[in-house]
């Protein structure tokens, strides 16, 4: 019997509702968007749609282990508690730390934070949100006196101008992007401006794209403040009644005249003028911003430079207007609610206020509460490296990949006396360095709440029984807390008890002084918790049903009740390009992968869009550095190096290169870009500058290149360069090497693990080509293509053969050419992941059937008609081939 369960997507901060039809007996699930969820009204993107393909048990961490040996929970938990107690006793509480994640549920997060700050008595609980949202948090706090996102998604439909700043919404918040696209279709006068050094897929709906110089946003928004100030386009009444510090902020922007800004940002002055004019003359303006703003050594200033413009014009706290920080992770917002960052305490209270410390201590009944901030992420791993922090517990994050200067992070964990990792996946770059591994329940097994970008709390509900011996993160933490003799404060038996306590703390001695207040849930019953509908906080006596917008009353959480302008002096990035490292490395996300690929790369269909690590570079730079399209390049910074496939494109600015953040040592030999990223951080928020690292690039010319497609996963790969890509019933290995093996057949056997081989071979020694195929009963097992000239057929026809139980004669004959037999079309690289439609298929349909719009392509091929994330790419194909 199938059961339908409503839950929430575990990926991005849009926080889409999912309606899951669960076949518990067979552990499978059909995923649909939840029509009634206000974040998505039934829509899902490619990642959410593919969730059903990611729940397999293969690769899961299912059993606790200590020092590489599987064990039971009792031994593992005892060991963690003992070693933590021991370390604290010898070296004090600041010698231990927890490093958490915006992918933990609120209940998990609350317990972790309470344990470290409330009872171990150290501030050393930080989170990957330090790399993500901390500049927004700091900017909000400076301007509003609290970490408040004023608006909501409904504002997209009210806005007349939407500005996407350092946000590739089309790929990173796809359901919100579709909603904005729909708002524009319904209201053609809605204008969209994209501010990003790259021309991204989000530019598809843009009326104006400002490809500003990397890091120059503070100039751009100081320029806007200056412009509205001089064009008498400010709102003097609003400034007077609801703000402080305008004169100082305007004075600081005095040097940001339009020509000066055009020069600093290297943007066309007419475009700049147009943007400023639109902002000044449009009533309802939303500024959506994300990592292009936050991940900067002056990210907090950039956030405030944006907020300043909204305050000066009163465009805040009303429908369709306001600054809107898009959260990244599914529970980035929930983590901020519980105080997951090391300078925060709990429930939007922090260490800066002694009354807060006293209040939380009384609420928790703790005498040993921490009284000062702990170490933020980059400093924390430096302290581990230096041996100051001796025991660390990492949960729900993969810092060996995602922190800057990631080779040093790896060394830090190698040196650390005691490393505990809780994860749901067995082999990650971080689990590889753990002394104790604790199996956490994954998305489809967990129960609790998450909060999305618009402050909306939704339930995640378990679909299946726990896998193996996996446990909820809150349970693991509770068990350790009890073993550390804090059992009185950690009596939890279920998530609802934790949620109630969290809700009660938010209302404790609050009386309207703190924005985060969900005290209406302080007595919620199990039944009502189970039925909880998505609700936007605050949820209290005054707003029992939640509240869509804050600041509509012009009241802020500062001591004076007025919003604060911050005078901004634009500052340069931590390190500028120089003769040794002349290019700027920008890093970010792809449409179909989630961070370090531990879950998305399990779904074959999500690996086809961008299968290999790549570097995007402008044609002039490619020529200057001798790079060719699809060749390999080595990229080097002062901190580390990597290899990537060259993609030459006019969407990059000269002097800039872009690399996706996703590849790890599990998926590629040299794709872990975190190794290169500079460790500079923002002085206020301590957020690292992940979007700006000086690098150099050169061609990497291996002696040979090639690929293997195999039905079976390899246990070892011997070539110098490799990338592993999971497909539908096959694994694809892209390879390159510096040594030609004496005997390719022997090499093939070694790599594919085949014994007693019946390979069909083709060899052209003069050209350095080697090809081989292995069939068993006419079923394709493996094919190998090696060449010294890097000339290969598309992989798509060959990969399509793996779903067949038997190849026919023409297919077998064509196999070693790699080209489909006459009359069969190659689909080309996959563009539409939902329906598996390739580029070649779309191009052919455009040409043969004279298609002129993405709607026509959709009618003809279905491509782009489900989640819509590939529409920008289809439109580009129409432009090029229509
Ligand atoms: N598909 C997918 N979606 C995701 C995620 C994922 O892993 N995969 N992760 C989620 C998470 S945790 C996050 S935080 C969000 C991130 O969402 P986004 O912030 O939208 O994603 P990024 O690709 O990191 O960066 C956004 C853009 O910032 C631009 N940028 C770089 N430097 C500058 C600059 O100096 N100024 C400006 N204005 N722009 C600049 C980059 O070119 C890039 O296009 O995505 C969430 N959604
Ligand atoms: N250069 C560069 N670096 C970046 C960024 C960038 O744009 N450029 N972006 C930064 C940002 S915004 C972010 S958010 C980070 C993300 O970086 P990470 O947090 O390091 O990446 P994830 O792959 O999301 O790691 C989540 C881990 O938690 C595990 N997991 C999933 N669910 C659960 C669970 O319920 N419980 C437990 N215990 N484990 C679970 C997953 O298997 C995975 O190993 O990267 C940051 N680093
Ligand atoms: S937009 Fe996609 S990844 Fe984000 S919550 Fe919705 S379905 Fe999940
Ligand atoms: Mo993030």
Image (cartoon, helix red, strand yellow):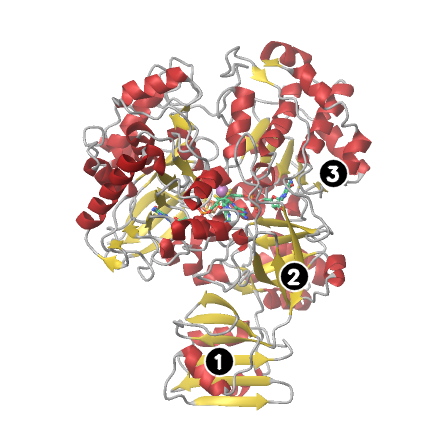
Q: Which residue is mark 2?
A: 647
- Badge 1 or badge 2: first in the primary sequence: 2
The residue nearer to you, when weighing 272 against 15, is 272
Horizontal and vertical percent position of residue 522: 28, 23
- Badge 3 or badge 1: first in the primary sequence: 3
Q: Is residue 629 visible?
A: yes
Residue 60 occupies which quadrant of the picture? bottom left
The residue nearer to you, when weighing 119 against 290, is 119
Alpha-carbon neighbours of circle 1 within 10 Å: few (<14), some, or many (≥20)? many
Horizontal and vertical percent position of residue 472: 27, 44
Q: Which residue is mark 1?
A: 783
The mark found on residue 265 in the picture is 3
Mark 1: secondary structure: strand
Q: Could you tell whether 665 is left or right of 182 in the image? A: left
Residue 881, compared with residue 260, is above or below; it is below
Residue 249, compared with residue 73, is above or below; it is above
Task: List the single residue furthest toward the front.
Answer: 90
Q: Could you tell whether 779 is left or right of 554 in the image? A: left
Q: CA distance from mark 2 to mark 3?
A: 25 Å
From the Cβ of disc 3, is ligand 1 less than 8 Å away? Answer: no
Q: Is residue 151 visible?
A: no
């Amino acid at each position: 019997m199938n059961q339908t369960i409503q839950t929430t997507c575990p990926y991005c901060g849009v926080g889409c509702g999912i309606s899951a039809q669960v076949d518990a007996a067979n552990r499978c699930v059909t995923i649909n968007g939840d029509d009634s969820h206000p974040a998505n009204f039934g829509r899902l993107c490619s990642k959410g749609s593919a969730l059903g393909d990611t729940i397999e048990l293969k690769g899961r961490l299912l059993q606790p282990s200590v020092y590489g040996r599987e064990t039971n929970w009792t031994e593992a938990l005892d060991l963690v508690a003992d070693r933590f107690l021991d370390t604290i006793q010898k070296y004090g509480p600041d010698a231990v730390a927890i490093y958490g994640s915006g992918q933990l549920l609120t209940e998990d997060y609350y317990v972790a934070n309470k344990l470290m700050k409330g009872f171990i008595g150290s501030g050393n609980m930080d989170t990957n949100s330090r790399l993500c949202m901390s500049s927004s948090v700091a900017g909000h706090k400076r301007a509003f006196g609290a970490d408040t996102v004023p608006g909501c998604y409904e504002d997209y439909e009210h806005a007349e101008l939407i500005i996407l700043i350092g946000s590739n919404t089309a790929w990173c918040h796809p359901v919100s992007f579709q909603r904005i696209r729909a708002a524009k279709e319904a209201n053609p006068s809605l204008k969209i401006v994209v501010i990003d050094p790259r021309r991204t897929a989000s530019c598809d709906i843009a009326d104006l794209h400002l490809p500003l110089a990397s890091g120059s946003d503070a100039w751009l928004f100081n320029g806007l403040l200056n412009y509205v100030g001089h064009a008498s386009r400010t709102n003097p009444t609003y400034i007077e009644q609801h703000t402080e510090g305008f004169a100082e902020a305007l004075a600081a922007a005095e040097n940001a005249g339009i020509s000066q800004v055009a020069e600093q940002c290297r943007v066309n002055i007419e475009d700049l003028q147009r943007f400023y004019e639109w902002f000044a003359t449009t009533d309802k303006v939303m500024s959506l911003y994300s990592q292009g703003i936050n991940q900067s050594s002056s990210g907090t200033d950039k956030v405030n430079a944006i907020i300043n413009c909204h305050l000066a014009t009163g465009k805040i706290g009303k429908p369709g207007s306001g600054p809107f920080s898009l959260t990244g992770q599914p529970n980035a917002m929930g983590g901020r609610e519980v105080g997951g960052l090391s300078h925060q305490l709990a429930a939007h209270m922090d260490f800066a206020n002694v009354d807060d410390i006293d209040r939380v201590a009384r609420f928790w009944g703790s005498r040993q509460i921490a009284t000062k901030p702990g170490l933020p992420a980059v400093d924390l791993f430096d302290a581990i490296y230096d041996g100051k922090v001796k025991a660390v517990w990492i949960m729900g994050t993969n810092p060996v990949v995602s922190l800057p200067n990631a080779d040093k992070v790896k060394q830090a964990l190698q040196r650390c006396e005691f490393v505990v990792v809780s994860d749901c996946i067995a082999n990650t770059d971080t689990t590889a360095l753990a002394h104790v591994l604790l199996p956490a329940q994954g998305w489809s097994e967990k129960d609790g709440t998450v909060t999305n970008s618009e402050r909306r709390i939704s339930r995640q509900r378990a679909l299946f029984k726990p896998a193996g011996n996996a446990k909820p993160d809150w349970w693991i933490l509770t068990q350790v807390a009890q073993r550390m003799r804090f059992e009185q404060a950690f009596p939890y038996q279920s998530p609802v008890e934790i949620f109630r306590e969290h809700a009660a703390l938010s209302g404790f001695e609050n009386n309207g002084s703190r924005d985060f207040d969900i005290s209406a849930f302080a007595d919620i019953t199990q039944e009502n918790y189970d039925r909880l509908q998505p609700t936007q906080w605050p949820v209290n006596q005054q707003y029992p049903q939640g509240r869509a917008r804050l600041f509509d009353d012009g009241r802020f959480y500062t001591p004076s009740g007025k919003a604060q302008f911050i005078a901004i002096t634009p500052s340069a990035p931590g390190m500028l390009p120089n003769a040794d490292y002349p290019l700027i490395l920008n890093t970010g996300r792809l449409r179909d992968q989630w961070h370090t690929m531990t879950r998305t790369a399990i779904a074959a269909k999500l690996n086809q869009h961008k299968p290999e690590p790549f570097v995007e570079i402008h044609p002039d730079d490619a020529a200057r550095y001798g790079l060719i399209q699809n060749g390999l390049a080595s990229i080097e910074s002062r901190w580390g190096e990597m290899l990537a496939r060259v993609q030459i494109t006019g969407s990059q600015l000269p002097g800039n290169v872009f690399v996706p953040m996703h590849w790890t040592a599990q998926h590629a030999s040299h794709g872990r870009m975190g190794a290169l990223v500079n460790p500079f951080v923002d002085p206020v928020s301590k957020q690292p500058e992940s979007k700006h690292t000086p690098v150099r690039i050169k061609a990497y010319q291996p002696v040979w290149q090639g690929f293997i497609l195999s039905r079976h996963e390899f246990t070892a790969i011997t070539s110098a360069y490799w990338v592993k890509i999971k497909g539908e019933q096959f694994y694809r290995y892209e390879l390159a090497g510096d040594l030609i093996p004496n005997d390719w057949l022997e090499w093939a056997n070694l790599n594919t693990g085949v014994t007693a081989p019946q390979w069909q071979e083709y060899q052209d020694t003069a050209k350095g080509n080697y090809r081989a195929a292995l069939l068993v009963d006419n079923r394709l097992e493996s094919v190998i293509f090696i060449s010294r000239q890097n000339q290969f057929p598309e992989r798509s026809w060959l990969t399509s053969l793996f779903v067949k139980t038997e190849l026919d004669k023409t297919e077998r004959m064509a196999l070693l050419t790699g080209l489909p037999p006459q009359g069969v079309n190659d689909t080309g690289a996959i563009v539409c992941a939902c329906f598996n439609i390739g580029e070649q298929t779309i191009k052919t349909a455009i040409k043969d059937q004279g298609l002129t719009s993405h709607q026509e392509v959709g009618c003809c091929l279905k491509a782009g008609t489900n989640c819509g994330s590939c529409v920008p790419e289809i439109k580009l194909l129409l432009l090029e081939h229509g």
